[in-house]
Image (cartoon, rainbow, N blue to C red):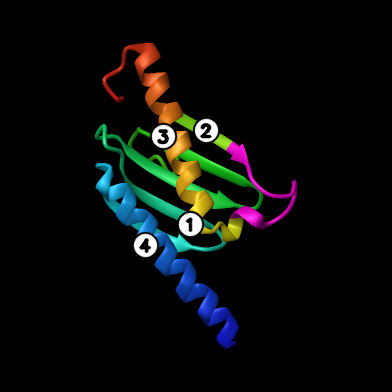
């Protein structure tokens, strides 16, 4: 059981460090609601829009905007992660997770710029 506890402690510490980095880039009110199975983060993008990030099974999701982006969001992007049909994304480490969330947020910003929206 010690190995599992060590993994969980390390996972939480690494994700907390990733959230601190996001805060340094203007992301606000970040909450790591779950660090595994699935990894979930809620908060506000630097542009002021609410977002929901989820990583489970073999998929990563960033959903932005709307009344509740964890339910229905006007902007969503999904990317595959790990083996198809696997569980790699459910236990997403912070290092690739931070890179993925920033990459998806950049796609959101680009889509806003293309549409002339004020979200980016």
Classify mark 2: residues with Cα within 10 Å, few (<14), some (14-19) or many (20+).
some
- Pointer 3 residue: 105
Contact between labelled residues 2 and 1, with CB atoms less than 8 Å apart: no
Q: Quadrant of residue 68?
A: top left
- Residue 88's place in the image compared with 27, above or below, is below
Answer left or right for 7 relative to 34: right
- Pointer 1 residue: 94
Res. 28 in view: no
The quadrant of the picture occupied by the N terminus is: bottom right
The part of the chain drawn in magenta is 79-89
Residue 47, image x and y in percent?
26, 32
Residue 30, image x and y in percent?
30, 52
Answer left or right for 24 relative to 75: left
Residue 67, image x and y in percent?
33, 37
- Residue 113's place in the image compared with 120, above or below, is above
Residue 86 counted in the magenta span: yes
- Pointer 4 residue: 16
Answer left or right for 30 relative to 35: left
Contact between labelled residues 1 and 4, with CB atoms less than 8 Å apart: no
Contact between labelled residues 1 and 3, with CB atoms less than 8 Å apart: no
**Marks 1 and 2, how far apart in space?**
19 Å
Q: Going 36% across and 20% down the picture, which residue do you hit?
A: 112
């Amino acid at each position: 059981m010690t190995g599992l506890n060590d993994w969980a402690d390390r996972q939480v510490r690494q994700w907390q460090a990733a959230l601190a980095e996001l805060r340094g880039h203007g992301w606000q009110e970040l909450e790591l609601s779950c660090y595994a199975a699935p990894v979930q983060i809620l908060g506000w993008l630097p542009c002021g829009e609410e977002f929901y990030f989820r990583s489970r099974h073999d998929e990563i999701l960033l959903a932005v905007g709307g009344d509740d982006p964890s339910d229905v969001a006007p902007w969503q992007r999904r990317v595959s992660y790990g083996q198809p049909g696997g569980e790699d994304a459910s236990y997403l480490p912070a290092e690739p997770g931070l890179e993925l969330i920033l990459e998806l947020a950049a796609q959101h910003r680009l889509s806003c710029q293309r549409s002339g929206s004020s979200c980016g």
